Amino acid sequence: MKIHTYLSPPHMGKNELKYIKKVFKSNYIAPLGEYVNKFEESISKTINIKYSLALSSGTSAIHLALRVLGINKNDEIWASSWTFIGSVAPALYENAKLFFIDCDESWQLSPSLLLEEIQNRKTKKEKLPKALILTHLYGQMAKINEISKICKENNIFLIEDAAEALGAKYNGQYAGSFGDMGIFSFNGNKILTTSSAGMLVSDNEQWIKKAGFLSTQAREEEIFYEHKDYGYNYRLSNVLASIGVAQMEVLEKRVKKKRKIFLWYKKYLKDKVEYMPEIENSFGNRWLTTIILPCPYQKVLQALSDKGYESRPLWKPMHLQPLFKENDGIYNGVSEAFFKNGLCLPSGTKLKKKDVEKISRIVLENINRGSLKVKI
Ligand SMILES: *Cc1c(COP(=O)(O)O)cnc(C)c1O
């Protein structure tokens, strides 16, 4: 059957088209223009951070964060192993060495593995990494309090990959605003989308200025084109930024609906599956409802697909990717187990309760009973 219900399709509000029309009328179709500024301001204001830079993607935002910190082939970057490739591929662009860290019961990077590895390096008198890329997976907060403390104490720059976590909070503070820099994504299936965009945020004005310079081909301030360094064409177009401004207006609404969808699933699936936790004092955006089945996911995924529902396995950990077979890391088997039995359920914000009921019924009918649960 053809897919009729996607995992997390775009959900436009009332003002996106209106703002696009304004852009057309002004003819600021070309890069930059007032909506780029407005989009940046709305992010800065919402998450309470000083500076934001609108870019063409979340991946480019991470790349610029690394460039700004001067990461190169002599540096090591540590990162969550359980993440999406866009989170870590930029380290390869700069030929930095990647080292991966597994997760714990929070379904996120384990602070105790992080500490253990720092201790290992200290014992061996080896260098610590220059930066840690921490993903807040599926819109839920990682143990940001502990992790940012560890990074500060050990002079490791913290880059928060909040691509999936716009609107998530810990102790009332927004994801993306804890680290030295944070990034967001507005690609097609994120909680908000402009079709594609990214945002780099920081309280450090110099870094954001430098990133802005690199995002527009590193052009010096001359009338002619003068270059002392090389950059990229990473800036966001005014047209897409206008969609972003309208999407930011509905952020709270979208988060509310995503959380509601999660509760509906919980109501129907009860304790037959495990759910991604919300750590104490945190508030997730529940971008996708993610579950761990008591059996491998394949049969359930197929059954849903047969009925026209798109579901997806959880991210395949980076340390299991052929691309990274030579890379080292510190692992405990948790993300690997999650990958075997985990599933992302349809979580689009237009879903109705009866859709969730139908999907849940299919899930329950296709769970193999009696299999082992994931052990942490
Ligand atoms: C989507 C995503 C990215 C990359 O964002 P793009 O805008 O698609 O480049 C990075 N990290 C995570 C965890 C993501 O989910």
Image (cartoon, helix red, strand yellow):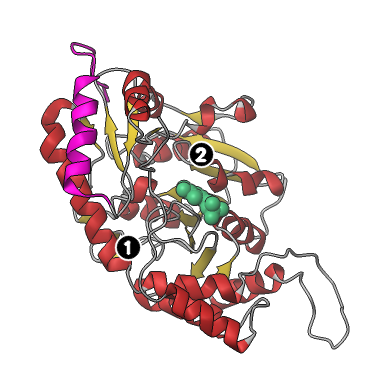
Q: Nearer the viewer, mark 1 or mark 2?
A: 1
Q: Nearer the viewer, residue 188 or 138?
A: 188
Q: Position of residue 347 (x, y in %)?
A: 31, 46
Q: The N terminus lies in which quarter of the figure?
A: top left
- Assign a secondary structure to mark 1: loop
Say what amino acid the circle numbered 2 marks. Lys
Q: Describe residue 375's horizontal placement relative to residue 226 as left or right.
A: left
- The residue beneath circle 1 is 167
Rendered residue at 39%/35% (across/down)? 113
How many other residues sit within 10 Å of disc 2, few (<14), some (14-19) or many (≥20)? few
Q: The C terminus lies in which quarter of the figure?
A: top left
Asked where in the image residue 36 lies, by quadrant, the reply is bottom right
Q: Nearer the viewer, residue 38 or 284?
A: 38
- The residue beneath circle 2 is 122
Q: CA distance from mark 1 to mark 2?
A: 37 Å
Asked where in the image residue 10 lies, by quadrant, the reply is bottom left
Q: Nearer the viewer, residue 353 or 244?
A: 353
Does residue 128 show up?
no
366 is within the stretch colored magenta: yes
The magenta segment is: 351-376
Rendered residue at 56%/28% (across/down)? 321
Asked where in the image residue 237 lies, by quadrant, the reply is bottom right
Rendered residue at 30%/59% (across/down)? 168
Q: Position of residue 314 (x, y in %)?
A: 40, 33
